[in-house]
Amino acid sequence: MLTHPLAEVRARLEEAVAALPGDPATATPQDIYDQYEMLAIEILDSEFDQFKEGLLEHHLQTFLLLKRLELGIKDG
C-alpha cells in the first residue's frame, strides 16, 4: 500500500490508463500519451484542492513529461 498521496495519484493514473478499452498493442505512443494526459487533467480538475497550491499540477506535469520521454515522443 502506498503512503504518499502523490504516489497514490500516480498509481491511480497508471491503473486508469491500463483499464481503458482498446488494444494497447495497436495504440501508437501518441495515443497512449493522450490517454495519460486526458486522465491527468481529470484528476487535476477533481483533486487540486486536496494538495498545496500548484503541487498536484507540477507533479502531473512532471509525470507527463517523463511519460513522453518513456514513450519516445518528441516535442512537436
Image (cartoon, grey):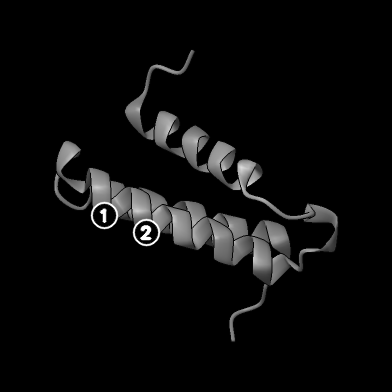
Image height check: is 65 above or below 20? below
Identified at 57% across, 36% down, the residue is 15
Image height check: is 58 above or below 10? below
Disc 1 and disc 2 in contact, CB within 8 angstroms: yes
| Residue found at the very far right of the displayed protein | 25
Q: On the picture, is 21 further left or further right than 7?
A: right
* Callout count: 2
Question: Where on the picture, by quarter, is residue 36?
Answer: bottom right
Q: At numbered mark 1, what does the secondary structure look like: helix, strand or loop?
A: helix
In the image, which disc is placed on residue 41?
2
Identified at 33% across, 28% down, the residue is 5
Mark pair 1, 2: CA separation: 6 Å
The percent coordinates of residue 38 (x first, y second) are 46, 61
Q: At numbered mark 2, what does the secondary structure look like: helix, strand or loop?
A: helix
Residue holding disc 1: 45
Which amino acid, by three-letter code, is at mark 1? Asp
Q: Residues within 10 Å of mark 2 (few under 14, many from 20)?
A: some
The percent coordinates of residue 67 (x first, y second) are 60, 56
Q: On the picture, is 4 further left or further right than 76?
A: left
Question: Where on the picture, by quarter, is residue 2?
Answer: top left
In the image, which disc is placed on residue 14?
none
Which amino acid, by three-letter code, is at mark 2? Ile
Q: On the picture, is 23 further left or further right than 2?
A: right
Q: Residues within 10 Å of mark 1 (few under 14, many from 20)?
A: few
Identified at 79% across, 54% down, the residue is 23
Give the camera-side residue of 24 and 76. Answer: 24
The percent coordinates of residue 12 (x first, y second) are 48, 35
